Image (cartoon, rainbow, N blue to C red):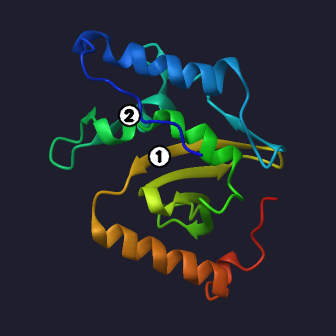
Amino acid sequence: MLPSIINTSGIDATKLFDHLYRFFHQDFVCNRTYLNQTIYIDPQSKQLEDGKEKTFWHLTTKKDQLTKIRLYDPRRAERLNWVKVIIENHSAPLVSYFYHQENNAKKDIRLYLWAENHDFVVILQKLGRSSSILVTSFYIDHPHKKVDYKKRLHAYRNGTNPALMNVDWF
């Protein structure tokens, strides 16, 4: 169900992000993407950074913990074309989804779409009744994160977190 990863070998480093941006632009800017055919995934095209949506940078780079600078993340970037497929097929057996209350100041509740067998996660945050933003996506490369997501998934499914009791976007 998931397409092949994007082959970036042989692409000039100065053209890499422009190459990747074509996938993002096609999936989220030129064409609308919807979760459950009703919730629009807003690419936030008004929030540009270096001429590209900030969301794009969160799908292709990750923040270095020491320098706090976003650096190219090949494992995220090469799976950029998976993001729309996972969103549009959130109820397929390939994807496990759960809601999670973040530890940020707003205590946002976000929807995690986890292609568990492929170690890939897409995170959405609802904006209103019928729109949301694509927060990020990434390849899970640390075993402890898989354990954490399993716990979150089971907590959501078992209803053990009171903050998530009546959370349902669709």
Nearer to us of marks 2 and 1 is 2
Q: What residue sits 42% from the left and 35% below the top?
A: 5
Q: Position of residue 8 (x, y in %)?
A: 31, 24
Choose top left, top right, bottom left or bottom right for residue 43. Answer: top right
Q: What residue sits 58% from the left and 57% below the top?
A: 113
Q: Residue under circle 1?
A: 137
Q: Position of residue 120 (x, y in %)?
A: 45, 53
Residue contact between numbered discs 2 and 1, judged by CB atoms under 8 Å: no
Dot 1 falls on a residue whose secondary structure is strand
Q: Is residue 13 above or below residue 161?
A: above
The amino acid sitting under disc 2 is Ala
> Is residue 45 in sight in this rendering?
no
Q: CA distance from mark 2 to mark 1?
A: 9 Å
Choose top left, top right, bottom left or bottom right for residue 41. Answer: top right
Q: Nearer the viewer, residue 1 or 167?
A: 1
Dot 2 falls on a residue whose secondary structure is helix
The amino acid sitting under disc 1 is Ser
Q: Position of residue 100 (x, y in %)?
A: 57, 68
Q: Residue under circle 2?
A: 77
